[in-house]
Amino acid sequence: TLGQELSSVKSYIYIQNLRYGERYELHVAIPQELLACQTIKFSLQPIVENAVRHGLNENGTLLLRVQPDYTAQKVRILVQDDGEGMRRETLEKLSTNGHNGKGIGLRYVVSILKSYYGGKAQMHISSAEHEGTTVTIELPLEGRLLQDDKSADRG
């Protein structure tokens, strides 16, 4: 569920703060009714990890926000950091390939979203130097996110 994903993200930030001192803040804005929604396991943690490792570097704040769009039958999950942001070239590589050739985190998320949701899920990355980065995942609300089944790929 989104609630379980949130718990994993909170644990990750907690561990990073234990390792490096209280460098990172996590702010969460998720409507209570969406915490029980089903989603894919470990779909947020790689994005948060990238934000910490590449966006925040030494310290900073992360915002994890979930916005339902009941009219469009979608939910938007945003992970925002207040770090240095990315150069245009880096952003273009990520937007084109889903990765910059180094890690596998974003490739995993893009791959699992395509595999599970087909073309109904999307991931967008926006960033500007000195203005932070936002990763937005859009998932369909049509049943899959709202179902209470326990298939192998879901939490």
Image (cartoon, rainbow, N blue to C red):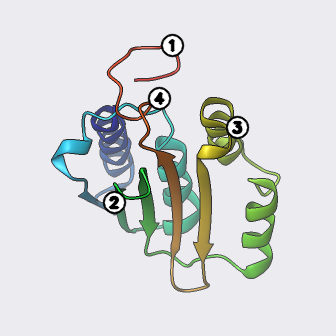
Residue 7 on image: x %, y %: 29, 37
Q: Earlier in the sequence, mark 1 or mark 4?
A: 4
Q: 89 or 75, which is in the foreground?
A: 75
Q: Quadrant of the N terminus?
A: top left
Residue 33 on image: x %, y %: 19, 43
- The numbered dot on residue 65 is 2
Dot 4: what SS?
A: loop
Q: 75 or 22, which is in the foreground?
A: 75
Residue position marked by numbered label 3 in the rendering: 111
- Please tell me how crowded label 1 is: few (under 14), some (14-19), or many (20+) other residues with Cα within 10 Å: few
How many discs mark residues in the rendered view? 4
**Residue that appears at 31% across and 42% down:** 6
Tell me which amino acid carries mark 4.
Lys
Residue 20 on image: x %, y %: 38, 53
- The numbered dot on residue 152 is 1
Tell me which amino acid carries mark 3.
Ser
Dot 3: what SS?
A: helix
Q: 44 or 34, which is in the foreground?
A: 34
